[in-house]
Image (tube, helix red, strand yellow):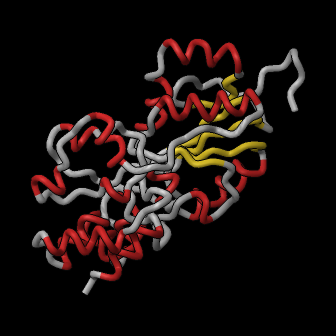
Amino acid sequence: MTGPSRRPSLAVWKFASCDGCQLSLLDMEDELLALVEAVKISYFLEVTRAVAPGPYDVSLVEGSVTTQEDLERLHRVRAQSRFLVTIGACATSGGIQSLRNYAAVGDYVAAVYANPAYIATLSSSAPISNHVPVDFEIRGCPINPHQLLEVLTAYLAGRAPRIPTHTVCQECKTAANVCVLVAGATACLGPVTRAGCGAICPLVGRGCFGCFGPAATANTASLAARLSADGAGPADVVRIFRSFTAGAPEFAKESAAHDT
């Protein structure tokens, strides 16, 4: 609990990621000004080199765990964080880098780096929740800044966050988009992907890439059957499910079922 004269402390941590979710926080602009009056930003290297020691009331963690050093640092972050929130596809599902999980990492290292012997990495890229307890997840690539604001506001108010768990399809219906899957036979993960982006890809005639990960009611087998009926071969179905959230259990299981 926090006293009336003390602002809760906020820390923002980066692991293997592109920084896009941290930038979503900075992009809130007017809301950010109100936020910094309600919380004390104690650790946020994207913004300032000034660091206040923990423990921290809230930690936002961006990125996946890909090295032993990352793993050790993550345990230190968890130990000094009262409420830990993972932000973005990398932190919640392993991100685009989880594609490494489907191949021999040594082959990648040998192909990319001139001196592979200097590269120390884990054999897989994993979400934060695989390693430490997580109090809440905010999905997306990048995250929806309004969802982040809702989670922080809910914490300050002592209530549960109100984050939608329905699908992108419902966002399409709300926006009166023509269904790219039904009308255009375009491969789309909208029926199994959690809402949050505003159906931005279908809005411009492209299929959903699944950036927000599986919805609570995701029926991936049904969607895979529809994709196959529209002409997608097994390799196509695998590719569709192995994208920004390839490491999400529901998507990983479905892609493995077609990986012949």
Task: Give the residue displayed 12% in from the left and 69% down from the top.
Answer: 230
Q: Report whether residue 183 is seen.
A: yes
Q: Nearer the viewer, residue 161 or 248?
A: 161
Task: Give the residue displayed 47% in from the left and 21% down from the top.
Answer: 28
Question: Percent from the top left, x then y, of residue 67?
Answer: 52, 62
Task: Give the residue displayed 60% in from the left and 65% down from the top.
Answer: 130
| Figure quadrant of the C terminus | bottom left
Q: How many marks?
A: 0
Question: Percent from the top left, x then y, of residue 111?
Answer: 25, 69
Q: Nearer the viewer, residue 139 or 101?
A: 139
| Figure quadrant of the N terminus | top right
Question: Percent from the top left, x then y, of residue 113?
Answer: 30, 63
Q: Nearer the viewer, residue 204 or 230?
A: 230
Q: Report whether residue 106 is seen.
A: no
Task: Give the residue displayed 44% in from the left and 30% down from the top.
Answer: 23
Question: Residue 181, relative to residue 37: is it above or below?
Answer: below
Question: Residue 140, relative to residue 225: is it above or below?
Answer: above
Question: Residue 173, relative to residue 10: is it above or below?
Answer: below
